[in-house]
Image (cartoon, coloured by chain):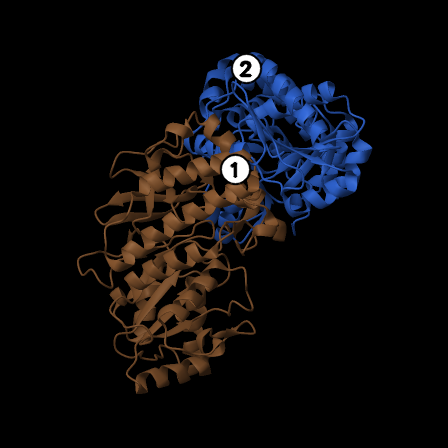
Amino acid sequence: MIIKANLARSVALHERARALVSAFERGEPPPESRDALACDIARFQADTIDGYSRLCRARGVNITSLTCASDIPAVPTDAFKLTRVATFEPREANVVFRTSGTTQGIEARGEHAMRDGTTYDAAAVAFGKYWLARDLAPGKVMVLVLAPSAEQVPDSSLIHMCQQFAKAFGHPASQNDTFLVQDGVINLSRFHKRVATATAQNMPILLLGTSFAYVHFLDALDARVGAYGHTPLPAGSRVMQTGGYKGKSREVPAAALRRELARALRVDEREIVAEYGMTELSSQFYERTLFDAASPKGIFAEPPWARVVPVDPNSLVPVADGDVGIAKIIDAMNVDSAVAVLTEDRVRRVVGGFELLGRAPGARARGCSIAIDELLGSTRSTREKTAP
Amino acid sequence: MIRSAESRATDVWRIVFSARDVAAARAAILDDIVRSTNLSREGVELAFEKHLELDPSDADIANLVAAAGDAERVTVVLSSNVFVGALRAIALARAASADVVVRPSRRDPTFARALVRAAAARGDSSLRLCENFCVASAQQGEIHIYGSNETIAEVSAKTRVKIIGHGSGMGIAWVSGHADMNMAAAALAYDVVAFDQHGCLSPRIALVEGDNVRATSFGRALHEALEQLGRKVERGTVLPAEQAEAERYVATMTYVGRVLVGSAHVVAIAPVGSPLVLPPPNRHVHIASVANAEAATVQIAPLSRGIITVGSDNPDSARTIAPPWARIARLGWMQRPPLDGPVDQRPRSI
């Protein structure tokens, strides 16, 4: 009985969430406020997840009377590594995304399970298209992904998202023609063939990848074409860059990587758009540079259903506008997990969204005591931002 | 000139006697140490009383001498906070060489300075301070460096002389199936309170053999013991970055398991089977239940390279779960290892 009632609440909340996305896609005002939906989701999660109910009580928040989303107690991302963060039973999971492994091994991978993945897909595609391809008709852009396919890595939220982009607005193509990492290496021949095809058809390319994939890509390009070689992309092409390095390649500062990519692919640096997302979220954030000539790099736009709230790291209370805090992310698409997530990233609200300032430095343990980061390495989530 | 083991032991004993001199006259430097370590006054007193190795045995010193090696010159670069660690570091250096240079921690130089001066007063002319020692200028001998792994790597990159690094680490408590909960908790509380968990032997995680009910029972007992001990030995100053990590840990564990927040400590009981996490220092203990010693070994494996000591009510049982290099101690004695060599006995490859 309770399970059925919970399912009905979840279904209704998913419908409300998708209604926000639909309104955004149509350019209409939202049918309700983000605050109203997010607070209802928080109540649902407090009713169905004991841990969240405990967290609300411990933070002294009366969830019943909550009206402002920024007051919703946030679940630290670490919790996803230690327990299930879900309003439903494991057997009801429709999609499960996992963070990358850490030095703690596979057991320590964070898990974000979804009962209804369509809400994630709708939100990801709507906002991704808005900041990456809103000027292109569906099917008129070739989507290339510097990653293995979802068949090979079914639990990666990033690859899933890229697949959704390819399906939703990409020119139809096979998996092998879209996902260019095969057997662990970038298939550069196929990349060149695809670029040649797109150029012949006068079709722009949307190239998607992580920072470490781009480093390997540039290295491979140099090795193939010669140092400082380049492969011009067709006019109107753009590049999405996401994620940190996590020891998977040599580390290149974000600005240098962007410069190198722009040179190698003959695109403008403003056509290289950073995405900020993480496995624990269902929403993503994008730099505005492709469609907003006045927006500087490093400023990320939020969809109307999500909000980044900088909070004081000690009190977890929102800081004054313009001050730096830790990102507490309200994500109304996280219906069945955590509507408010506490990250370890430093942010500041600015006109047009938020500025990403990098990872909050872990407290270096004084004396010879070991620090968390030192023991576990800096690997955290699969999907983390590239600090601008 | 080749120094005999006896001569080296004599030099080490002189350092120990010098430490006794410093401890006896500590009133003059107590305030400075409180300021530089962020420990409370009681915390500094506790370190002098219980954690400064002033009564080693001849066998301990012989072992220390044997472990020290031999060098033309040793430069000791000290870290901060576990201020009494300077005794062991300088004793090891002095055992290894007749020419020892000490660079105290910039943040926490008081005890090391006092020790070197006390040794000089006792006639040791082979030991000297060099507050502005530049690693890149070292041309001979070896450098013994204490600090984070990051610092050791940085120093190593700047010099061609041999580096012996003593990096970061931690302790783990193993509460066996036969332990008396209250006694084990009371003993562990002393290990936790010492140096406010900023030592590389400080217990941060306690594994309790049995089910989660037993782990919770131990957690409650430890919570009570830390509350009581905290009244006698106040916690020192918690830095803002440490406070932020503490807030995050408490929020995480509130969601994930059960948290007992005391006046100046936190005890968290993890759900069965969840991966171990390292809580922040400043009297935070992460408790997990494990079915048996075999399960404990599996559970701690991902963290093992950071484990320097395992404390237990049952040292024999602790040996079965500990990494081979780890010191084994009784609960309450984790932070009081004999003066028999480096506290960190991990092989260099770890």
| Kind of residue at disc 2 | Glu
Chain identifier of the residue bearing label 1 in the image: A
Residue B42 is marked as: 2
The CA span between labels 2 and 1 is 46 Å
Q: Position of residue B193 (x, y in %)?
A: 59, 22
| Kind of residue at disc 1 | Thr
Chain identifier of the residue bearing label 2 in the image: B
Instruction: State left or right for residue B311 relative to residue A49.
Output: right
Residue A48 is marked as: 1
When the figure is inspected, residue B40 is found, relative to residue B340, above or below; the finding is: above
When the figure is inspected, residue B296 is found, relative to residue A356, above or below; the finding is: above
Asked whether the viewer can see residue B145, the reply is no
Which chain is painted in blue? Answer: B
| Front tag of 2 and 1 | 1
Name the residue: 61% across, 25% down.
B192
Hue of chain A? brown
Q: Secondary structure at mark 2?
A: helix
- Is A105 or B319 nearer to us in this picture? A105
Instruction: State left or right for residue A333 relative to residue A84.
Output: left
